[in-house]
Amino acid sequence: MMNEEINYTEAFARLQTIVAEIEAGEISVDELSEKVRHAVALIKVCKSRLSSTEEEVDKILRELDAATGASAEAGAEGR
C-alpha cells in the first residue's frame, strides 16, 4: 500500500501517467509489475475517496430532506 496520504486528484493524475506510459510502451518489462502494483494502490485510493464522498453527499442530502420536510410540515400546520 502507499505510505503517504494522497488525495483523489493526485492519485488519479498519477494513475493516468502510468496508463499513458504503459500505452506508449515507455515501461520496460522489468518495471511493469511495479507500475501495475502502484496503479492498483492508486485505484484503491480513488475508490475509497469516491465511496467516502458519496457517503458524505448522501448524508447531506438526507439531512436536507429532513430539514425541508420539517419546514414543510411546520408551514402546513401554520396555515
Image: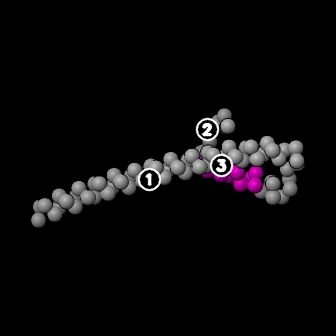
- Disc 2 or 1, which lies upstream in sequence? 2
- 31 up-or-down from 73: above or below: above
Query: What's under tag 2, amino acid-wise?
Result: Glu
Residue located 46% across and 49% down the image? 55
Q: Which residue is mark 2?
A: 5
Q: Is residue 18 magenta?
A: yes
Which quarter of the rendered picture does the N terminus lie within? top right
Residue that numbered label 1 is attached to: 57
Residue in the picture at 74% in, 43% down: 37
The spot of residue 51 in percent (x, y) is: 52, 49
Q: Which residue is mark 3?
A: 43
Q: Main secondary structure of the magenta part?
A: helix
Give the number of marks. Answer: 3
Disc 1 packing (10 Å; few <14; some 14–19; many ≥20): few
First in residue order: circle 1 vs circle 3: 3
Type of amino acid at the residue the image marks with label 1: Val
Q: Secondary structure at mark 3?
A: helix
